[in-house]
Image (cartoon, rainbow, N blue to C red):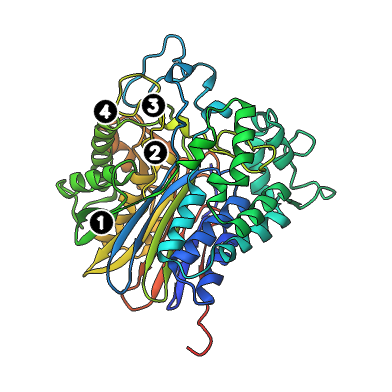
Amino acid sequence: MQTFTIHKAAVRSEHGLVAAQNRYAAEAGAAVLSRGGNAIDAAVVTSLVLSVVEPWLSGIGGGGFLVRADGKTGEVDTLDFNVKAALGVDPKNYPLARGQVGNWFNWPSVAGERNVKGYSSIAVPGAIAGYDAALRKYGTIAWADALQPVIEHAERGLQIDYYAALCISVDAGSLAEYPGSRELLLDDGRAPKASDASAPRYKPMPRKAKLLRRLAQAGARDFYEGEVAAMLAADLEAGGSAIRKRDLARFEPRWQPPLQGQYRGFEIKAVPHLSGGPSFVDAANRLSRSALKSTSSQAEAALAYATAIREAYEHRLTTLGHAALQDAGCTSHLSVVDRDGTMVALTNTLLSRFGSHVALPNAGFLMNNGMMWFDPRPNQPNSIAPGAQPLANMCPLVLFRDGKPTLAIGAAGGRTIFPTVLQLVSYLADFGMSLETAFHQPRIDASTPTIKVNARAAADVAATVGRKFPVEIVEDTLYPVNFSVPSAVMRAPEGGFVGMSHPSSPWSAVVPAAPRAGR
């Protein structure tokens, strides 16, 4: 049980902010803003650097979504660059484990965990294509310039502090099964120890740095059609993956108009279709019809949240499909606002912690386990199919008020993402909390059959929610992760912008942009 109190203050700036799960990445993005770059420039750089400084969560071997809202015109665009199954995928290669049938909250596992770990779990990555598409349409910096900060971080390497050592040690046994992962992250096949003074403080990523330098010179499409693509395809085929050069060559991200909704004066702008956006809008609609009001107690609010989230999840899992496992998910979210008020919410993921656990031996970076997101049962809305895209949990949002982008928000944490974001939005809209207060407010998670209640919630929360649902009282610990990890930037009522990152994370941060010279 935790015996300490954690608090992070909100960060304010008139010149722009970057909120992310790692301060090195947030600093890299804020430096772009300080040099005159815009929100897309900063978001791409931040996400790329995250692939080195927290490689267990996201990376160029994964995929994601973003929402961009123009601070001057109000125009909103969304980009889907999530992973896809290979054309050669055969559903018969993912047989159900014996005796398991599953239901809408607990789907069956696959024999040998073929959809969860190893080369058979890997889907075609979309991150590089997504970052390139974002810069081409809305960026102001060159592709090679966007890559320079992550190249520098890759050459220096992952900092081995206690948190990195913890993250690696949790999965060290599985990572050791794959030569590329063992070389990238382990010390003689074992997890590094932050307490070992004789051990290196950083683990350089020379193969990844070399690949990134090639992409800086040849362009992003080289990842999908050129020299890098050939290397990736060779690594994947040698390991037993169904991905081939044609799968990489045919990958294209997709720009789409936003899914729109309303909640208590906020206009919701979300990624449509195969994201967490539709379920967030569904839950927000249900919550708006509930008895929740500004005078509701914490316990009454928690019951309203649990009911809306559970009903939205039942609809999601029975009509849209979802991942087969109760995995918390490991994802990176970042939120950016630039000096013009343009906002970007971007979420990238490898899915599970360390994704497939496979770092490609020649490419030198970790790959996703995107096949986990498909329903392994046949004839379901989200069943495994050649070339298909799975339904994802990621839920980046930009909310408008009075016709202006007001809040860019999202979170990491698999199924816990949209329940967290819904509660944070409600704290702002229903209870008039500041962003800082909202981020420190105890939450529940209703993404599993048993509702998790933060141990710091009011004494009657668990009892009230327990009248309708089974409950479990848990701590908001660093590990295991019981609640998702949000970050947000917001237009401040008094002017300028305010940002918050997850208070419980030792590395999350909001970094302000410096004023440009002469301004």
- Mark 1 → mark 3, Cα distance in angstroms: 32 Å
**Which circle's residue, 4 or 3, is located before the other in the chain?**
4
In the depicted view, which residue is nearer to us: 19 or 443?
19
Label 4: which secondary element: helix
Label 3: which secondary element: loop
Residue extending farthest to the top is 99
**Which circle's residue, 2 or 4, is located before the other in the chain?**
4
- Residue type beneath disc 4: Thr
**Which circle's residue, 4 or 1, is located before the other in the chain?**
1
Residue 82: x and y in percent read 43, 43
Label 2: which secondary element: helix
Q: In which quarter of the image is residue 260?
A: bottom left
In the depicted view, which residue is nearer to us: 77 or 354?
77
- Residue 439 appearing in the image: yes
Q: Quadrant of residue 309?
A: top left
Label 2: how many Cα within 10 Å (few below 14, some 14–19, many 20+): many
- Mark 4 → mark 1, Cα distance in angstroms: 24 Å
Residue 412: x and y in percent read 45, 47
- Residue type beneath disc 2: Arg
